[in-house]
Image (cartoon, rainbow, N blue to C red):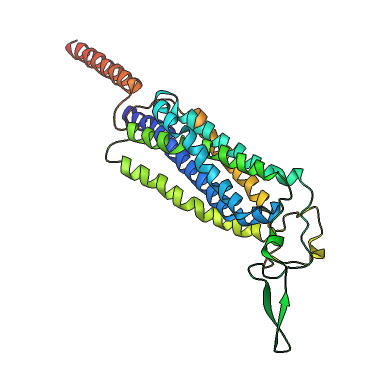
Amino acid sequence: MAETEKIETHRTRCISKLKIFLLAITLAFVSKTLSGSYMNSMLTQIERQFNIPTSLVGFINGSFEIGNLLLIIFVSYFGTKLHRPIMIGVGCVVMGVGCFLQSLPHFLMDRYEYESIILGNSSSNSFLCKENETQIFRPTEGPSDYVKEVKSLMWVYVLVGNMIRGIGETPIMPLGISYIEDFAKSENSPLYIGFVETGAIIGPLFGLLLASFCANVYVDIGSVNTDDLTITPTDTRWVGAWWFGLLICAGVNVLTAIPFFFLPKTLTKEGQKDNADIKNDKEEKQIEEVKKKNDGITKGK
């Protein structure tokens, strides 16, 4: 009976430490890749929303790597000396803050107004059309007349938010992988890391599905009557609800951070007994020796 209770206690302790960390870090990988793939899919919608040039969109996309590079060396070196699970949890919260900041322009800007007339091809001085199977050339304005005018500087929120998201992602991979390698059995470590990498593969799948859904929802859903719209998701003037998915990503990132704040700084190496187990073993041996002595005295009498 005592042996059974001992096995159950040891099994519960293992589940509540290393296995929970493995589950938490896998979910963190899912959430960070979910946010990244969603953001990359929504760049076209953001370009239309703010009417910004493609070069600026590329800079916004690269701001994530800029934020990541700012701290990756310091986190990798000093992170192992600190409380790694809490560092990862803080990183997840920072990613959530970054996603929320990216969605903020939608609530600060006026409603999106699309042009009622689609202009011709700006790559040449004229374009070819057909009317009654007759080819007609119609003059159009020069390319200089089609230079985009940025509607608002609110795109800066998206830029800074994406950079903050990159900063938040910094501790997840180096500290998470090192934590597993330090406290898992050498033969189990590749398996655990494989689970984590599986999460990194699943995340983009959910991100693309979420992007597909949000792209078909009008950007000002809830504040305008969608029945009055004269454009559809296939129209080049359509802007999907890019902000809605960012709010979901923010919530997911914050939720995945919660378990890390309850995990210890260090664990007993998997397969080895901790101090409590050693102490219990000594106490059980002493009790057994006392019982044997008492049995011997009883039999002698």
In the displayed orientation, state which residue is furthest to the left.
Answer: 300
Image position of 58 (left or right of 115): left
284 or 27, which lies in front?
A: 27
61 or 191, which lies in front?
A: 61
The percent coordinates of residue 144 (x first, y second) are 68, 60
Residue at image x 76%, y 43%? 108
Residue at image x 60%, y 49%? 56
The percent coordinates of residue 114 (x first, y second) are 76, 60
In the displayed orientation, state which residue is furthest to the bottom.
Answer: 133
Image position of 27 (left or right of 138): left
The percent coordinates of residue 112 (x first, y second) are 76, 54
Image quadrant in which the N terminus is located = top left
Q: Quadrant of residue 219?
A: bottom right
Q: Quadrant of residue 256?
A: top right
- Would you say residue 169 is visible in this rendering? no
The percent coordinates of residue 45 (x first, y second) are 65, 56
Work out whether 36 lies above or below 164.
below
Image position of 21 (left or right of 41): left
Image quadrant in which the C terminus is located = top left
Total number of numbered discs in the rendering: 0
Residue at image x 56%, y 51%? 58
128 or 195, which lies in front?
A: 128
- Would you say residue 273 is visible in this rendering? yes
Work out whether 42 lies above or below 15.
below
18 or 174, which lies in front?
A: 174
